[in-house]
Image (cartoon, grey):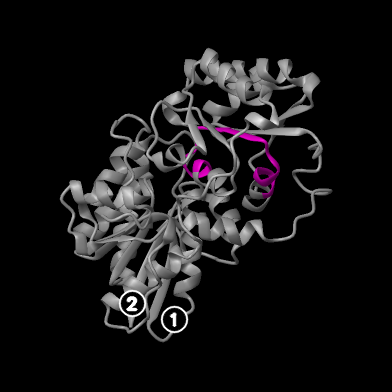
């Protein structure tokens, strides 16, 4: 029997790994599946897993308030090493680019356990943006034994870096699997966290939490949002900002934006509410990597408050645009979009991030590598460009 240890630590990881964990559970004859949460974002992780009916087998609970990255990573390395000794996995799976992924990859390497990197090959080509994620994902790919690339572009990046073609698998992104599942569910707007939002308004969703923007850049983007909300109040535009729990985000947001008319500040949304809010939006303004994919997957235009992105496919198909964090650029780009007449708005774009079957492909690949005969799914249509 194949023992697979899946490791998650943040909410995006939980969302993107949930489809894989669910598919693994469908093969009890061939797979012993163990899910470990490092607790990097403990409450948010469990909330995301609850959406998919998943409970971690192990929860390390490592996050402490204002913990430094080195402290967190050091604890993860030590605790995950113990977990690996106890579980004795054949494979360790981790997704993305956080401290959890970096630690999972290194512990797999130290213990000579095969490591599968889900969402491999993403690059901004600037090691400080996003920080520290760009270095984390490069390190994870350096020690990986199987690369589950979300797009052909990511696969080609891995080839250029010297990874073996036989270890690179273009699967699509598992976030589209999760997104399609949740978007199709019924949702009651009249109660819960979205009850205060006027659905008939033109809604702009704002999310911001990037570490490299903390300080002056973050305050500047908050001032831009404040002034945009004031300018477009008379046009029926409502800005909705679920505020991240990090105090470096909450302090400037509540200082600059609290009490502004037509600007609704919310606590972090559960994933189901976030997806249904996104579906109703006219525009998304974000610095999140995952939301870039999700909004494009829902054909909602995205303005990305970053100078670089590791997800260029959304920009290439016309679904996303980089606008940075400067006041003038954000105000100009959002204003241009909100003033556009319907004739000048871009048409819905095809999703470049997959077809909703990425998790099936990943599990089939792992089973086939273990000698279990599982018929592979066809190549993902939106990313079939040759490596």
Answer with left or right where residue 198 lies relative to residue 135. Answer: right
Residue 229 can be seen in this image: yes
The image quadrant where one finds the C terminus is bottom left
Name the residue: 59% across, 48% down. 298
**Residue 383: x percent and y percent?**
39, 55
**Can residue 111 be seen at all in this image of the molecule?**
no
Q: Quadrant of the N terminus?
A: bottom left
Is 8 in front, or is 121? 121
Please give the residue where the numbered disc 2 appears in the rendered image. 367
Asked whether 387 or 254 is in front, the reply is 387
- The residue that appears at 32% across and 64% down in the rendered structure is 92
Q: State the image quarter where residue 60 is shown.
A: bottom left
Q: Nearer the viewer, residue 101 or 189?
A: 189
Residue 289 counted in the magenta span: yes
Picture quadrant of residue 123? top left
CB contact under 8 Å: marks 2 and 1? yes
Residue 101: image x %, image y %?
35, 51
Q: Position of residue 263 (x, y in %)?
A: 73, 26
Name the side, left or right, on which 354 lies relative to 134.
right
Residue at far top of view: 328
Report the side of 286 relative to 259 (left or right): left
Name which residue lies at 38% across and 65% down.
Answer: 379
Looking at the image, residue 236 lies above or below residue 146: above
Rendered view: 61 above or below 286: below
Q: Residue at x 44, y 49 (%)?
A: 62
- Image: magenta residue range: 276-292
- Residue 27 is tagged as 1
Upstream in sequence: badge 2 or badge 1: 1
Q: Residue furthest front?
A: 343
Q: Position of residue 386 (x, y in %)?
A: 28, 56
């Amino acid at each position: 029997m194949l023992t697979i240890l899946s490791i998650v630590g943040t909410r995006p990881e939980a969302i993107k790994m949930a489809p894989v964990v669910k598919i693994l559970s469908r093969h009890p004859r061939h797979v012993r599946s163990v899910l470990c949460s490092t607790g990097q974002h403990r409450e948010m992780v469990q909330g995301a897993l609850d959406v998919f009916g998943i409970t971690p087998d192990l929860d390390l609970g490592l996050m402490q308030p204002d913990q430094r990255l080195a402290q967190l990573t050091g604890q993860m390395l030590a605790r995950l090493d113990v977990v690996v000794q106890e579980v004795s996995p054949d494979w360790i799976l981790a997704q993305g680019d956080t401290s959890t992924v970096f630690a999972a990859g290194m512990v797999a390497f130290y213990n000579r356990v095969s490591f599968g990197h889900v969402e491999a090959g993403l690059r901004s080509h600037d090691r400080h943006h996003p920080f520290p994620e760009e270095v984390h994902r490069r390190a994870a790919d350096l020690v990986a034994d199987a690369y589950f690339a979300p797009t052909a572009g990511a696969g080609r990046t891995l080839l250029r870096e010297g990874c073996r073609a036989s270890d690179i698998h273009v699967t699509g992104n598992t976030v589209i699997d999760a997104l399609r599942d949740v978007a199709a569910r019924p949702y009651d707007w009249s109660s819960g966290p979205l009850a205060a939002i006027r659905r008939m308004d033109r809604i702009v969703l704002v999310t911001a939490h990037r570490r490299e923007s903390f300080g002056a850049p973050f305050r500047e983007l908050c001032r831009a949002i404040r002034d945009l909300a004031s300018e477009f109040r008379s046009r029926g535009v409502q800005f909705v900002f679920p505020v991240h729990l990090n105090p470096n985000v909450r302090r400037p947001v509540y200082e600059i934006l609290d009490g502004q008319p037509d600007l609704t500040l919310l606590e972090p949304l559960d994933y189901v509410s976030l997806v249904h809010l996104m579906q109703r939006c006219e525009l998304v303004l974000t610095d999140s990597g995952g939301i870039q994919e999700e909004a494009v997957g829902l054909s909602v235009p995205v303005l990305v408050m970053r100078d670089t992105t590791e997800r260029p496919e959304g920009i290439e198909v016309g679904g996303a645009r980089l606008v940075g964090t400067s006041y003038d650029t954000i105000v100009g780009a959002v204003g241009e979009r909100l003033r556009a007449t319907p004739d000048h708005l871009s048409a819905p774009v095809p999703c470049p991030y997959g077809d909703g079957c990425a998790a099936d492909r990943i599990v089939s690949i792992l089973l086939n590598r273990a000698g279990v005969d599982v018929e592979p799914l066809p190549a993902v249509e939106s990313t079939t460009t040759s490596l």
